[in-house]
């Protein structure tokens, strides 16, 4: 789709037949990657089963890449679906964020931090 930053085939680290991986332009941590279907589709739940499989295959490949390049202590994997969930680019993209000891004062709750007052339990 014209004007979509994720439809442009640039900065690709690796790919498969239906999706690709690139670095996040505004990384949360060093090595933050995006896993993106090639087809322009906004909602993760509207991707085909084949696209979901391709995305997850690349998540696995990206995890191995990050392990070799950055040796993180953990990972966050997430996808924002819809404006209410924080999606700003309306093209599906999974965030794979390497995590390191002490990169956050209190990482407990992980992705629950999308609603900060509900992160700790």
Image (cartoon, grey):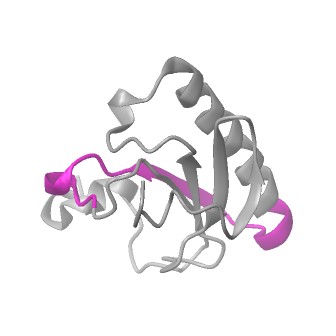
Relative to 42, does residue 18 appear above or below in the rendering? above
- Read off the magenta span: 67-87
Q: Is residue 33 left or right of residue 82?
A: right
At 32% from the left and 51% from the top, the residue drawn is: 80
Instruction: Give residue 107's quadrant in the image.
Output: bottom left
Relative to 16, does residue 48 appear above or below in the rendering? above
Q: Is residue 84 left or right of residue 109?
A: left
Q: Is residue 46 left or right of residue 58?
A: left
Number of marks in the rendered image: 0
35 or 101: nearer the eye? Answer: 35
- Residue 67, position in %: x, y? 79, 60
Instruction: Give residue 22's quadrant in the image.
Output: bottom right
Relative to 19, does residue 13 appear above or below in the rendering? below
- Residue 53, position in %: x, y? 61, 26
- Extreme residue toward the front, this view: 2
Relative to 50, does residue 73 appear above or below in the rendering? below
- Residue 73, position in %: x, y? 67, 63
At 19% from the left and 66% from the top, the residue drawn is: 116
At 47% from the left and 67% from the top, the residue drawn is: 5
- Extreme residue toward the right, this view: 68
Instruction: Judge whether residue 84 is colored magenta.
Output: yes
- Residue 65, position in %: x, y? 80, 58
88 or 79: nearer the eye? Answer: 88
């Amino acid at each position: 789709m014209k004007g979509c930053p994720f439809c442009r085939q640039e900065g690709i680290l690796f790919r498969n037949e239906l999706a690709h991986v690139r670095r996040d332009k505004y990384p949360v941590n060093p090595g933050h990657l995006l896993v993106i279907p090639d087809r322009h589709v906004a909602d993760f739940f509207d991707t085909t089963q084949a696209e979901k499989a391709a995305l997850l295959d690349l998540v696995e490949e990206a995890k191995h890449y990050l392990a070799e390049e950055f040796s993180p202590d953990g990972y966050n994997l997430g996808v924002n679906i819809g404006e209410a969930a924080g999606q700003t680019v309306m093209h599906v993209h999974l965030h794979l964020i390497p995590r390191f000891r002490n990169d956050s004062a209190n990482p407990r709750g992980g992705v629950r931090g999308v609603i900060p007052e509900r992160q700790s339990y």
